[in-house]
Image (tube, helix red, strand yellow):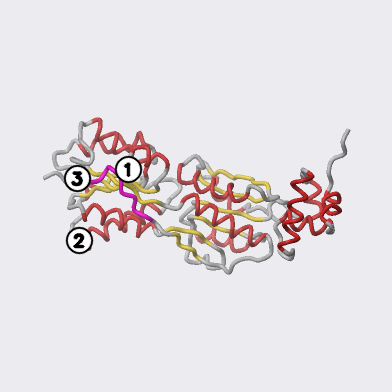
Amino acid sequence: MQKPVTIRDVARRAGVSAGTVSRVMGGFPGVAEETRQRVLARIEELGYRPNPAAQRLSSGKSLTVAVTVPFFTLPSVSARLNGAINLLAGTSYDLIIHNIQEPEERPSCFQNIPRRRQADGLLIISISPLCDSEVACLVEADIPIVLIDADHPRLDSLPRVVVDDEDGGRVATEHLLGLGHRRIGFMGDLADNPFHRNSTQDRLRGHCQALAAAGVEPRDQDRLEAGHSRAEARRIARGQLVSPDRPTAIFAASDTQAAGVLEAARDLGLRVPEELSVVGYDDIELAEVVGLTTVRQPLFRSGQRGMQLLLDALRGHPSPPSREVLPLELVVRGTTGPPPS
């Protein structure tokens, strides 16, 4: 039976120490690029696969990254998580996902932030708004933490990767105003949503700012609330679209809800965009499938960027605490056009 390849075998073949091989595999600094490439070539040539337990023992680290998300099946959250996982692949780190499915789980999540023996770093995705007690738990934690799509005025000590949802709401509504619409509805999450997500409120604020700048008075009956599901958005939109005084366009705070609006229009025989224009938000895969005009968030990229900041910290060269705002982009497809005459 062939003996398994060891780290010493790789070191001997590359002409370096076992410690150098370990630093190369962990992505740590202090190794010349030529040496790094030679070691990587010998690893590939010998088919070396490190023993995880031995790696943890020799490094004094858990070699684990924890990620906390709410409802990781939500398309936008899933896309961010996939970006983080994509960047982590190929490193020596394992991943533990903490999925918060009920509001009651949230306080425990922050009170029990992993210790160094449990995880080397923590990524928090799409949990907002953060309250003062949660911020205090993050600031006092003894491991590096990076936040994606989560923010707080007191979090200037931690790296955050965010988008400007207020600007996104403004961009979406300005597009509809530019086409000539003046009766523009807005569909967002329920006000009493248990996770108190503030992205809907930010997008609504931008929407209202765009209307005000154009001298358009928003109508209460054009502001719709629905759960974050296509079926509920469809039901709520149908109730609005049967009215003879219905809006000529609807800006939905997510592509999922926008898809529900499109289904409601189809149910009622309304032609899109000739009789109703629809704009979504996120640019998930569904948006391209149905030809939806939407505001594109860099979801996958934000997950990658957040994980990169965390890995940099774990490798000994952290970035200064910062709030990185990633750009948004309006993607015009086939669901928007001028209002009916």
Residue 341 painted magenta: no
Q: Quadrant of residue 134?
A: bottom right
Q: Tag 1 or tag 3, which sits nearer the N-term?
A: 3
Q: In which quarter of the image is residue 245?
A: top left
Which residue matches tag 3? 247
Q: Position of residue 78 (x, y in %)?
A: 50, 43
Which residue matches tag 1? 292
Q: Within 10 Å of the Cα at label 2, are there few (<14), some (14-19), or many (20+) other Cα atoms?
A: few
Q: Position of residue 1 (x, y in %)?
A: 88, 33
Under mark 2, the amino acid is Ala
**Which mark lies nearer to you, 2 or 1?**
1
Which residue matches tag 2? 214
For the point 34% across and 53% down, which residue is it? Answer: 330
For the point 40% across and 59% down, which residue is it? Answer: 164
Magenta stretch, main secondary structure class: loop
For the point 50% across and 42% down, which residue is it? Answer: 71
